[in-house]
Image (spheres, rainbow, N blue to C red):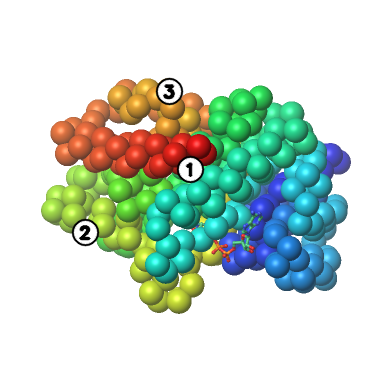
Amino acid sequence: AKDPVRVLVTGAAGQIGYALVPMIARGVMLGPDQPVILHMLDIPPAAEALNGVRMELVDAAFPLLKGVVATTDAVEACTGVNIAVMVGGFPRKEGMERKDVMSKNVSIYKSQASALEAYAAPNCKVLVVANPANTNALILKEFAPSIPAKNITCLTRLDHNRALGQISERLNVQVSDVKNAIIWGNHSSTQYPDVCHATVKTPSGEKPVRQLVSDDDWLKGEFITTVQQRGAAIIKARKLSSALSAASSACDHIRDWVLGTPEGTWVSMGVYSDGSYNVPAGLIYSFPVTCNGGEWTIVQGLSIDEFSRKKLDATAEELSEEKALAYSCLS
Ligand code: NAX
């Protein structure tokens, strides 16, 4: 039998946490033969709710779940973890300035970076979900200098999956037959959902989405805005933000990172930019990546037309501004 993998979920008493921990305990994230020990962190006001989640995990009697740590102590939570899914953060409340929210999250991610750096297992892989996800991940990277930059990522897989879902609905095909969409940039409304290289499996072979969707205005207009604004549409409908889809996508992100992407398929991940596609280096930016042997690689050589170029640059610009704002909160 395999040794258990320790998986940290911060903000585990929240809504995404409640959807995510049972998926991890069922093997959705790491596979049906991989035992796990869950580490759950939340803040003291949520301690009782967190204990309730721990009780439910016991009650569910998951065969793969070999232990649960439920705590409000970051050091205890981070100790020995192999994977860290950072869902906890400070939400933007009505009337709050962007700078105030940023400042709260910068201080959370600075201190959790230190706890991870000091106590996590070597080669721990980190996924930041909490918003502003890209910039929180960047702060975490800056304050955990001994964790390789390659190990720190943020979630844009939900946006990626939303793009696949929209194409599947539009063409009335199975979502599993659609692949190679790309989310470029920030997990925000400036993200660029790009299907210029996406394909659909058909009885007569793989066909480009751009050929199957003849309405270019839809691809350049409503498709993009629907994906960009899907989070807001879910809030409007549910009166709560996306949770099950966010949790499921977080599992997809880690599963593909650890176990690899299928041949010929890429996915979107927020990763530390090396300057590929003329995106400024030093931002956490969402790129198309393939994964193999537990490492991601940015897909190279895709053609970027003028329409796309502007969108890649606009979302990079926003991330540079966020980075500057985050740094101004440090001083
Ligand atoms: P909730 O407010 O339900 O849960 C957040 C939890 O984090 C709460 O239990 C809170 O007590 C806890 N928390 C706050 N500060 C903490 C700290 N310092 N350490 C540990 N825990 C802490 O929010 P939920 O709906 O679960 O969303 C969580 C985060 O995901 C939010 O920041 C949200 O904006 C972000 N999202 C990101 C998505 C993405 O694709 N990257 C999509 C979904 C989601 O909107």
**Mark found first going from the N terminus, 3 or 2:** 2
159 lies above or below 154: below
78 lies above or below 147: below
Tell me which residue sits at (46%, 54%) in the image. 100
Q: For numbered disc 2, what is the local secondary structure?
A: helix
Amino acid type indicated by mark 3:
Asp
Amino acid type indicated by mark 2:
Glu
**Dot 3, crowdedness within 10 Å: few (<14), some or many (≥20)?**
some
Q: Given contact means CB atoms under 8 Å apart, are the residues at marks 1 and 2 in contact?
A: no
Q: Nearer the viewer, mark 1 or mark 2?
A: 1
Ligand 1 sits in quadrant:
bottom right
Tell me which residue sits at (77%, 71%) in the image. 48
Residue 58 horizontal/vertical position (percent): 83, 66
Query: Cβ of disc 2 within 8 Å of ligand 1?
Result: no
Amino acid type indicated by mark 1:
Cys
160 lies above or below 153: below
Q: Quadrant of residue 322?
A: top left
